[in-house]
Image (tube, helix red, strand yellow):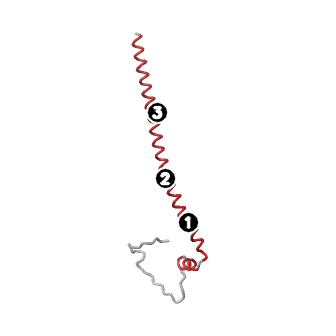
C-alpha cells in the first residue's frame, strides 16, 4: 500500500508542475504580446512626433517670412480673395468635378 500512495503523490506532483509550467508559459506569451503592442504604439507616436516637428518647422519659417511683401500678397490672395488692380479672374466651373485635381480644398 505504501507504494500506491507514493505513485499517486508522484502523479499529483507532475500534474501540479505541468499546470505551473503552463501558467508561467501563458504569462510569458502575454508579456511578449504586450511588449509588441507597446513597441508598435511607440513607433506610431515617434512618427507622429516627427510629423508635428516638421509642421512646427514650417510654421516657424512662415512666421519668419511674415514680414515680407510676398507673404502678405499670398495671404491677401488666398485667404481674403483680393486681386490686383486691372487683374482678370477666371473661374473654372468644372473645377470641383475635375478628377485630376491635385490640391486640397480648404
Residue bearing the label numbered 3: 24
Quadrant of the snapshot with the N terminus? top left
Q: Secondary structure at mark 3?
A: helix
* Disc nearer the start of the sequence (3/2): 3
Mark 3 burial class by Cα count in 10 Å: few <14, some 14-19, many 20+: few
Q: Secondary structure at mark 2?
A: helix
Mark 2 burial class by Cα count in 10 Å: few <14, some 14-19, many 20+: few
Residue 7 in picture, x, y percent from top left? 40, 16
Image height check: is 50 above or below 88?
above
Cα separation between marks 3 and 1? 49 Å
Camera-nearest label, 3 or 2: 2
Image height check: is 95 above or below 60?
below
Mark 1 burial class by Cα count in 10 Å: few <14, some 14-19, many 20+: few
Residue bearing the label numbered 2: 43
Quick check: marks 1 and 2 in contact, CB under 8 Å? no
Cα separation between marks 1 and 2? 21 Å
Residue that appears at 46% across and 41% down: 32
Residue bearing the label numbered 1: 57
15 displayed left or right of 56: left
Which residue occupies the foreground of this view, 95 or 33?
Answer: 33
Q: Secondary structure at mark 1?
A: helix
Amino acid at each position: 500500500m505504501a507504494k500506491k500512495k507514493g505513485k499517486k503523490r508522484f502523479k499529483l506532483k507532475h500534474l501540479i508542475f505541468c499546470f505551473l509550467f503552463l501558467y508561467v508559459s501563458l504569462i510569458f506569451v502575454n508579456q511578449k504580446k504586450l511588449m509588441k503592442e507597446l513597441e508598435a504604439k511607440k513607433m506610431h507616436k515617434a512618427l507622429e512626433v516627427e510629423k508635428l516637428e516638421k509642421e512646427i518647422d514650417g510654421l516657424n519659417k512662415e512666421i519668419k517670412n511674415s514680414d515680407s511683401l510676398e507673404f502678405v500678397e499670398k495671404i491677401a490672395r488666398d485667404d481674403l480673395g483680393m486681386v490686383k488692380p486691372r487683374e482678370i479672374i477666371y473661374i473654372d466651373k468644372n473645377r470641383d468635378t475635375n478628377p485630376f485635381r491635385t490640391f486640397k480644398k480648404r
